[in-house]
Amino acid sequence: MGITVKKADAFGELREEAQSVINDKTFFTDGATVIHFEILDTPLGKMLACATNEGICMLEFIDRRAFVTELKDLKRLLRATIETGTNKHLLSIEKQLNEYFQGKRKNFDLPLVTPGTEFQNLVWKKLLDIPYGETRSYKQQSIAVGNLGAIRAVGTANGANRISIVVPCHRVIGEDGSLTGYGGGLKRKRWLLDFEGGALSLFNEE
């Protein structure tokens, strides 16, 4: 049986705090931007996918400890309301995630909306440069952003990435090869690295 990513109950799966953030239509918003969201049931657990009309702005595991904070930050930074529903970007990410987990896609082709500081966006951009199946250390990523002394700041910016898997913060590890941190949990990080490195079956055979 092949790996599939499929839609789940788009609201009932969320914890109460996240539902409250979504339901509050006056919280950090002027209503000018609408974020549509869906819950995707993936091989690693349920993920919230969010997109504006401009592109994907969030893909995150709903059991992540910082999940509600990320949702609040996204709503504040975009001054947006959050609604159930779909758009062309959510349809695209569902299709491309399926291809990724089936071993048929190594790079995502999605417009991204990444509100944050200039430094955060530089760090996230450099994450996109790490090839599928490879890893980089936090030191290497600090050099990539032009500041060897920014290792800790790079780690913090990695942790603030709201678009998991697509913006591959899981590919950054300790200089000694240790996994170090990952917002989605170290088991998921290990799985993703093994999967991309070919150490795991693609699970697409009977």
Image (spheres, grey):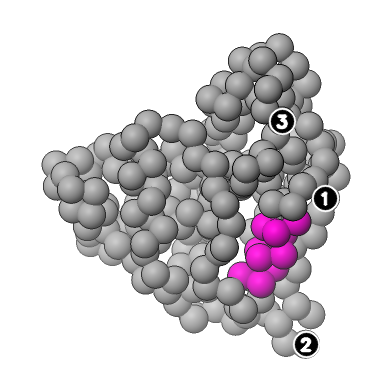
Which quarter of the picture shows residue 175?
A: bottom left
Left or right: 155, with 201 as reference point: left
Which residue in the rendered view is the most extreme toward the bottom? 206
Structural distance between the alpha carbons of marks 3 and 1: 21 Å
Numbered range of the magenta stretch: 91-100
Q: Amino acid at mark 3?
A: Val
Q: Which residue is mark 2?
A: 206
Q: Is residue 89 magenta?
A: no
Q: What secondary structure is marked by label 3?
A: strand
Q: Earlier in the sequence, mark 2 or mark 1?
A: 1
Q: Which residue is mark 3?
A: 34
Q: Earlier in the sequence, mark 2 or mark 3?
A: 3
**Residue ID at (68%, 46%):** 49
Q: Which residue is mark 1?
A: 8
**Residue ID at (65%, 63%):** 97
Q: Amino acid at mark 2?
A: Glu
